[in-house]
Image: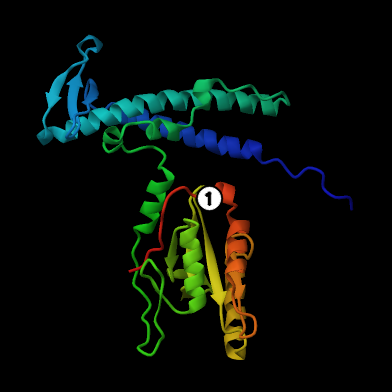
Amino acid sequence: MSKELLSPDFTVDTLRKRLAALNIALEQKRKDLKELPEGHLRIAQTSHKPQYYHYIEPKDFKGVFIPRSDDDLARQLAQKDYDLKVIKLLENEIHAMTRCLRQICRGGRLPTANSSAATKLGDLYAKMCPARQSLVTPVTLTAEQYAKQWLSVTWPRRPFSPDTPVHTTTSGIQVRSKSEVLIAEALSRHNIPFRYEYPLKLRRPSGDIVTLHPDFLCLNVESRTEFYWEHFGLMDNPDYSNNAAGKLRLYTENGILAGRNLIITMEIQSEPLTTRLVEKLIYDHIPQKKANTFSSYGLFV
């Protein structure tokens, strides 16, 4: 069989899913707009803190001062101003994407997107001043906002036995081995958020549900996808290696696959885990050109 020259094209399915999501967002934003007050918000930056003004007529841009006791009005007006621009961008993107789908399905060439349609929704929020950002809930979270929200989850920790050696990362997370410290430090160094020993419920072939605690649940912030990292550090031990094999089989049966959403590292006494290997695995799973641009640490409770 000859080598495949061109892999299957999933563009149409992706565009249709995006178009459906855009229409849902547009409908919701139009609905939200009806509940917001009349007028707009003007923010005056002072040396101490921003001041808010409510204006209705464009000619009266100065507006009426909004006291701090009525911050909710400022928040609603800021959200309205943001939503009006979001609606316009959503309409532009829907129009452009509809044209793209029609062209693709007819076998024609893709149209060139105009500048307004090509504008990313995230840029609209990113270009706001901090005072206005603090009043607005964006339709798409920034990478930092998404990671912070993802890291805010809490769960009960698995206990450490009193005779367990203490291994702690620089961010204060207690883990169970020096190799796990190495992995945790590398993840933090590359700004990859993670949860240590976050519980995972899997189904056995018998139908029973079992709860496992993978070493690391990691987040690729750019793609908004999660992946697991399991380190097996005592593979010299027959009982340990047999248990590891059973665990990996259970992962596979539940759609958690090495190379896709699971990173596996192993070591024996004569072949310890190295920083070089950990770095290579991180680079292969999340290329550095796509690395996050904010500082994050693993979360534990």
Front-lying residue, 144 or 24: 144
Q: Residue at x 48, y 33 (%)?
A: 22
Residue most extreme to the front: 47
Q: Is residue 237 left or right of residue 66?
A: right
Q: Residue at x 35, y 24 (%)?
A: 84
Quarter of the rendering occupied by the C terminus: bottom left
Determine whether 74 is above or below 248 in the image: above
Question: Where residue 262 appears, x then y in whole percent?
Answer: 58, 64
Residue type of the residue flagged with mark 1: Ala
Element assignment for label 1: loop
Q: Residue at x 58, y 47 (%)?
A: 289
Question: Where residue 10 appears, x then y in whole percent?
Answer: 66, 41
Q: Count the numbered circles shown.
A: 1
Determine whether 74 is above or below 275 in the image: above
Determine whether 269 is above or below 17 in the image: below
Q: Is residue 251 visible?
A: yes
Q: Residue at x 61, y 63 (%)?
A: 281
Using the rendered view, name the quadrant where residue 34 is placed. top left
Front-lying residue, 34 or 155: 155
User: Which residue lies under the disc numbered 1?
Assistant: 291
Question: Where residue 29 appears, x then y in whole percent?
Answer: 36, 31
Question: Where residue 246 appears, x then y in whole percent?
Answer: 60, 79
Determine whether 109 is above or below 170 in the image: above
